[in-house]
Image (spheres, rainbow, N blue to C red):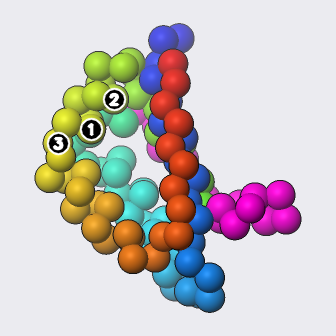
Amino acid sequence: PESALKVSFLKLKEDLGDAVKDEVLGVIRGIKDGPAAVEQLTCGENFSPARAKGFSVASLAVFKGVAEMEAAESNKELVESRKEKVREYLDGVIVIDFV
C-alpha cells in the first residue's frame, strides 16, 4: 500500500541485436544495486511485439513511497550516467510514475 511505482518502456533502435538488448537490461538491473531505495525491480523483454509499437524492453521499479522515488531521482549524476550508457541504443522511451 502507498508504494510508488515507475514503469518504463524502451524502444530500441532496429537491428541492434541481442547483445545490445542484454546490455540495456544489465543497466536496468544495476539500478537495484545502486544507492536508490528501490524495493523491487523487474525488467525484461516484450513477448508480444506485434502489439508493442516497437517497445521491446520494460521495467517496473517499486519504491516504499513517493519521497523515496524522488530521492532516487535527485541523484542527477548517477541517473544521467545510467542514461548515457544506453542513450545511443534508444529510439523512444515512455516513463509512467504512479502510486
Q: Mark 3 points at which residue?
A: 75
Measured Cα–Cα span from mark 2 to mark 1? 6 Å
Q: Position of residue 70 (x, y in %)?
A: 28, 28
User: Is disc 2 in contact with disc 1, using a CB cutoff of under 8 Å?
Assistant: yes
Q: Mark 2 vs mark 3: which is more N-terminal?
A: 2
Residue in front for this viewpoint, 33 or 20:
20
Residue type (three-letter) at the residue carrying disc 2: Met
SS type, badge 3: loop
Q: Do the residues labelled 3 and 1 touch (CB within 8 Å)?
A: yes
Query: Which residues, given as a range, are shown in magenta?
Result: 39-56
Whether residue 22 is visible, yes or no, is no
Residue in view at x 35 percent, y 58 percent: 30
Query: What label sits on residue 69 in the rendered view?
Result: 2
Residue 16 forms part of the magenta stretch: no
Whole-number angstrom distance, CA of label 2 to CA of label 3 = 11 Å
The residue that mark 1 highlights is: 73
Q: Which residue lies furthest to the top in this view?
A: 1
Say the numbered circle drawn on residue 27.
none
The residue carrying pointer 2 sits among few (fewer than 14), some (14 to 19) or many (20 or more) residues within 10 Å by Cα, namely many
Q: Which amino acid does label 3 sit on?
A: Asn
Instruction: Tell me if mark 1 has few (under 14), some (14-19) or many (20+) residues whose alpha carbon lies within 10 angstroms of its own.
Output: some
